[in-house]
Amino acid sequence: MRTYDDTFSGQRIYPGKGKLFVRGDSKVFRFQNGKSESLFLQRKNPRRIAWTVLFRRQHRKGISEEVAKKRTRRTVKAQRAIVGASLDVIKERRNTRPEVRSAARLAAIKESKDKKQEAVAAKSR
């Protein structure tokens, strides 16, 4: 038994039921009843008519079993060793207090400035 789908509403049309409408450009439209035919001929949009299959799919109506919301995977940050430093060294550096780190940075800056001054002094001699 061959069934067709209503062009407008999307519902099934069983044998012996419905109407066939052929447009001037030979495109065939099948309608289950006069209601869907009339709305089609009025150029109504089936997505805006609440009882059509298109509307119900678009607005997720009539889905009997609610599917549990898909879980999204959270990204987990993993620390890895870098070429110059092992993981232990990196963790140790991170755990040092900011004051100690800033003091070490200032000392390194001062040391490099002293080296530059010595180099400039050596050049001027």
Image: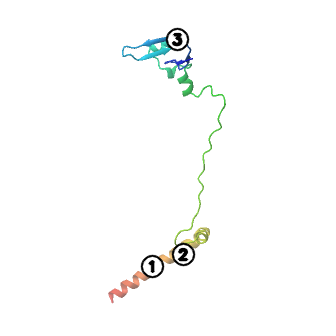
Residue occupying image coordinates x 59% and y 67%: 94
Mark closer to the observer (3, 2): 3
Mark closer to the observer (3, 1): 3
- The picture quadrant where one finds residue 61 is top right
| Measured Cα–Cα span from mark 3 to mark 1 | 91 Å
Q: Secondary structure at mark 1?
A: helix
**Whole-percent x, y for residue 49 in the image:** 52, 19
Identified by mark 2, the residue type is Ala
Number of numbered discs on residues: 3
Foreground: 3 or 12?
A: 3
Residue occupying image coordinates x 51% and y 75%: 106
Quadrant where the image shows the N terminus: top right
* Residue placed under numbered mark 1 in the picture: 112
**23 shown above or below 81:** above
* Residue placed under numbered mark 3 in the picture: 18
Disc 2: CA contacts within 10 A as few (<14), some (14-19) or many (>=20): few
Q: Is residue 28 left or right of residue 90?
A: left
Please report whichever mark, 3 or 1, sits nearer to the chain's N-terminal start: 3
Q: Secondary structure at mark 3?
A: loop
**Whole-percent x, y for residue 100 in the image:** 58, 73
| Measured Cα–Cα span from mark 3 to mark 2 | 87 Å
- The picture quadrant where one finds residue 63 is top right
Identified by mark 1, the residue type is Ser
Identified by mark 3, the residue type is Gly
Residue extending farthest front? 1
**Whole-percent x, y for residue 125 in the image:** 33, 90
* Residue placed under numbered mark 2 in the picture: 104
